[in-house]
């Protein structure tokens, strides 16, 4: 089963999933946690380029295509092999990030980016996408209080971030069967519990559907 996690920068999703792997392993599942952009050698090289200041002024399509190229390598070298071994693959950001950030916020258009992705990614669409929902104000507060180095996209202004949020809301409406929303404004412990519960339930339903086929 393929699960992806999405949200604004500062939504706390990376912290929220710290207990997820061990939680699922205790239930007997083999789990691969990975992230985008990155997750494999060539994809990490693309990550370094696309998030660096050297990419300042990049054309929206070049940016989108770099993320998609990085994703293609990640799918081919990491995600598909793990899915073939029946692992639960959990990816921190995936195709919806490109649709929200480049498709909507950069103005290319969600539908056109989605259609490119559907061709290039060869049907490798998540079975479940968990969206970590947080207000723009709270996500900015969390970003400011983080002492790690901010990347090129973290430093974008509030108009861009509002559009990213809008983009995600459009995607949640467009793919209601795939998205589940977690209220990420709660305490870390609550968000972790909510996330673990939603994902475990989804895995069990997925297994049920598979065994009925
Ligand atoms: P992160 O690893 O801190 O989430 O940083 C990745 C940044 O890249 C984040 O700001 C979201 C952005 N991004 C896109 O704009 N498009 C994409 O397709 C992906 C995967 C990430």
Image: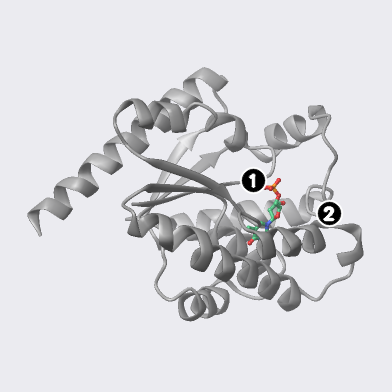
Asked whether mark 2 lies closer than 8 Å to ligand 1, one says yes
Q: Position of residue 132 (x, y in %)?
A: 53, 40
Quarter assignment of residue 152: bottom right
- Residue 10 relative to residue 82: left or right: right
Q: Position of residue 107 (x, y in %)?
A: 69, 72
Q: SS for tag 1?
A: loop
Q: Position of residue 175 (x, y in %)?
A: 39, 60
Rendered position, 21 above or below 100: above
Q: Residue at x 11, y 51 (%)?
A: 211
- Residue 140 relative to residue 104: left or right: right
Residue marked by disc 1: 8
Which quarter shows the C terminus? bottom left
Q: Residue at x 76, y 35 (%)?
A: 143
Q: Nearer the viewer, residue 169 or 132?
A: 132
Is residue 184 at least partly visible in the picture?
no
Q: Nearer the viewer, residue 38 or 202?
A: 38
Q: Which mark is residue 152?
A: 2
Tag count: 2
Instruction: Say how the picture is coloured.
Output: one colour
- Residues at marks 1 and 2, CA–CA distance in whole angstroms: 14 Å
Q: Nearer the viewer, residue 84 or 114?
A: 84
Q: Residue at x 61, y 70 (%)?
A: 68
């Amino acid at each position: 089963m393929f699960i992806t996690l999405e949200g604004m920068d500062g939504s706390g999703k990376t912290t929220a999933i710290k207990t997820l792997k061990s939680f699922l392993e205790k239930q007997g599942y083999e789990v691969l946690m990975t992230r985008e952009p990155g997750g494999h050698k060539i994809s990490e090289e693309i990550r370094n380029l696309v998030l660096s200041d050297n990419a300042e002024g990049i054309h929206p399509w070049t940016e989108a295509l770099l993320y998609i190229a990085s994703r293609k390598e990640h799918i081919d070298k990491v995600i598909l092999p793990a899915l073939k071994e029946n692992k639960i693959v959990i990816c921190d950001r995936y195709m919806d990030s490109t649709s929200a950030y480049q498709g909507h916020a950069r103005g290319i258009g969600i539908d056109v980016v989605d259609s490119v992705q559907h061709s290039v990614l060869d049907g490798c669409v998540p079975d479940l996408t968990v969206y970590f929902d947080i207000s723009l104000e709270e996500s900015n507060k969390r970003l400011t209080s983080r002492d790690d180095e901010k990347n090129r996209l973290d430093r974008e202004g509030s108009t861009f971030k509002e559009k990213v949020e809008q983009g995600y809301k459009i995607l949640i409406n467009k793919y209601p069967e795939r998205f589940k929303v977690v209220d990420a404004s709660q305490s870390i412990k609550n968000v972790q519990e909510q996330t673990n519960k939603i994902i475990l339930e989804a895995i069990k339903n997925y297994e049920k559907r598979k065994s009925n086929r």
